[in-house]
Image: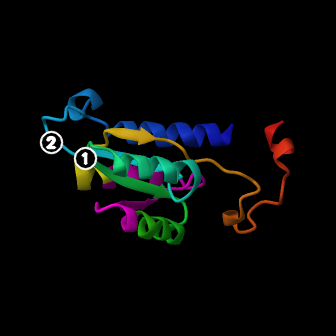
Amino acid sequence: SEVKVILLTICLCLMCVMTTPLSSTTNPTQHQQIVALITGANKGIGYEIVKRLAASETTVQCILGCRNIELGKEAISKLQKENDIKFDLLKIDLEDDPEEHQKTAKEIESKYGRCDVLINNAAVCFNDPTLYGKVSHTPFEQQAE
């Protein structure tokens, strides 16, 4: 239940800066850049989403939301080898204080003026070695229950 509250807080904070309807920014004649925040973007599904957005015909400013900045930098390094666009990186962690989530939203608003797309892909997998021993190993079947 605490994780649900934190996720809701992140979504609400980020929704505050989502001011431009996506339908108006996806019109190819406008040439306006779409600003997209993808959480959990340094690997897995989040990373693949960023790759697809970067390769799309629509101009997308991808902001990678990662709990580990170093892993985020590694992901950006790989992405830049495949794409000639600039990526941005923000530290965002479900375990952070809700005030940090508000700070992140304000940073996006300050730098880009808005957030058109939020892909809230962040998750915790207890088998994930990037948790650096924060939790003990739990088999997936047990997690699913």
Residue 10 location (% of width, % of height): 48, 43
Q: Are marks 2 and 1 in contact (CB under 8 Å)?
A: yes
Quadrant of the image for the N terminus?
top right
Q: Is residue 89 above or below residue 54?
A: below
Q: Amino acid at mark 1?
A: Thr
Report which residue position mark 2 lands on.
31
Residue 11 location (% of width, % of height): 47, 38
The span picked out in magenta is 80-107
Q: Do we see residue 143 in this rendering?
A: yes
SS at badge 1 = loop
How packed is label 2: few (under 14 Cα within 10 Å), some, or many (20 or more)? Answer: few
Quadrant of the image for the C terminus?
top right
Residue nearest the viewer, comparing 111 with 54: 54
Mark seen at residue 59: 1
Q: Do we see residue 103 in this rendering?
A: no
Q: Residue at x 34, y 37 (%)?
A: 16
In-image side of 1 versus 144 (left or right): left
SS at badge 2 = loop
The type of colouring in the image is rainbow
